[in-house]
Image (cartoon, helix red, strand yellow):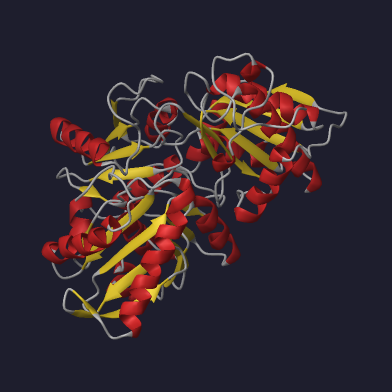
Amino acid sequence: MLKPRSDLRPNTFENELYPLITPNGFREYDARWLFGKELNLLGVQALGFGLGTYFLSQGAGRVATGHDYRSYSLSIKQALTLGLMQAGMEVVDVGVCTTPVAYYAQFALDCPAVAMVTASHNENGWTGVKMGAQKPLTFGPDEMNALKDIVLNNKGVAKAGGKYTFVENFREQYLEAVTRGHKLSRPIKVVVATGNGTAGAFGPEALRRIGAEVIEADCELDFTFPKYNPNPEDLEMLHIMADAVKAHGAELCIGLDGDGDRCGLVDDKGEEIFADKTGVLLARDMSAKHPGATFVVDVKSTAIYTIDPVLKANGVKVDYWKTGHSYIKRRTAELKALAGFEKSGHYFFNAPYGRGYDDGIVAAIAVLEMLDHAGGKKLSDLEASLPKTWSSPTMSPFCPDADKYMVVKEITAEYEDIKATGGKILGQDIVSVVTVNGVRVTLADGTWCLVRASSNKPSLVVVVESPTSSVLMHDIFNDLNARLAKHPEVGEYDQKI
């Protein structure tokens, strides 16, 4: 295998001879590149060769693989498979699928490793791989750095014994497994929106099998994503979901992202419920049966977890941890927590609810069963019973990969200096500056803001919340945004409140 290069241009002779892999694609816990500009097919093959070398060094010689529904994902998976086999791996291919289907294949097909070709919810043009060598965990920074070193420095080792198997109709095996033992007592009317992404082939059928009355919205697969990007954290998708609920008189709309590992909600009134608050509702429902349970949540999540009287009465313990599906998944396993929740819509259920990995369909089933347990209450009623806060969606201003961590470091130092010198923000004292992942600053009345570097895109991540008023939510955002604006590296937001 030739050593990868990062200076190749598309539509050149050299681009057909050498692997193209730019270093920025190796992110904190998975890999993401702009296909063609930052990665070519020979580069994917080199990635597979290095990944197979790493897997075998960890004693994992059998890998489950699949691909999402994008025009180029099958060819990328085939190039990755070739590289894995060159390294001596046994590749078990489950075809086009959601990421959780590939995770499930690790358990069902006795595969210690997984390599799922997906760009998740990223826009078309992106590709990537979600990887793990120990079910149900996926790579973290240590594994990603080791893989980056192997691939970019051409340290892959060729071994005999590479093998390929394709598993036919694995979709049916997954659907049977994920719905087994689940049956609603009434046909809850639910809209399912998938933005024409891969989950459209899985989500509606799964919910029908547990007895829901399913109305499909944008569930036909179309890799051009003609209406909106399948990301249930984006306000564009949430607004379309809200319109569908009203149009059909449904009890809720469930939105699944591009590779099916995230779940978003809109209630019966057409109001979006951000996933961190959905997590509070699920924790209430689950801890009623499992008092004293531990839940892991990411640092972007609402402060309601710490003040909710129902969770307190049920003896719930909450652990705030680093944002990122790999981090929350690993922390949930380490603490033997009942579940882990991310504001982005990743939900991680341990037994008896799940196998520890994130699956938007498993989360959707849990939400419908929660409604089934609610004695006729609507989702809006459940949300109204939570302590009131005003919170933003996740907002992402552009910031180059080379600069984003430095910007966060400088913003963190600025906040730490204000707290150390007794300064105020919005006329209030700072009560805490939490730096477990970026910086989360909390004021005296509980209003808080967070900024961190995105783990998978050239951007920052900004979230704000206030238990006092919508005005203070906007004020804390404006204050943070003014500080970010001093850094010329920070560009336009994908969305703003």
Q: Is residue 228 above or below residue 75?
A: below
Q: Position of residue 488 (x, y in %)?
A: 32, 51
Front residue of 401 and 283: 401
Q: Position of residue 46 (x, y in %)?
A: 70, 30
Front residue of 142 and 160: 142
Question: Residue at position x 40%, y 37% from top?
Answer: 210
Quadrant position of the N terminus in the picture:
top right
Q: Residue furthest right?
A: 160
Question: Residue at position x 54%, y 34% from top?
Answer: 128
Q: Is residue 91 left or right of residue 424?
A: right
Residue 298 sits in quarter? bottom left
Residue 408 sits in quarter? bottom left
Q: Position of residue 29 (x, y in %)?
A: 56, 49
**Count of numbered labels shown in the rendering:** 0
- Say if residue 314 shows up in the picture: no
Front residue of 479 and 72: 479
Question: Residue at position x 16%, y 64% from top?
Answer: 475
Q: Position of residue 377 (x, y in %)?
A: 20, 53
Residue 361 sits in quarter? top left
Q: Is residue 23 above or below residue 463?
A: above
- Say if residue 379 shows up in the picture: yes
Q: Is residue 35 above or below residue 469?
A: above
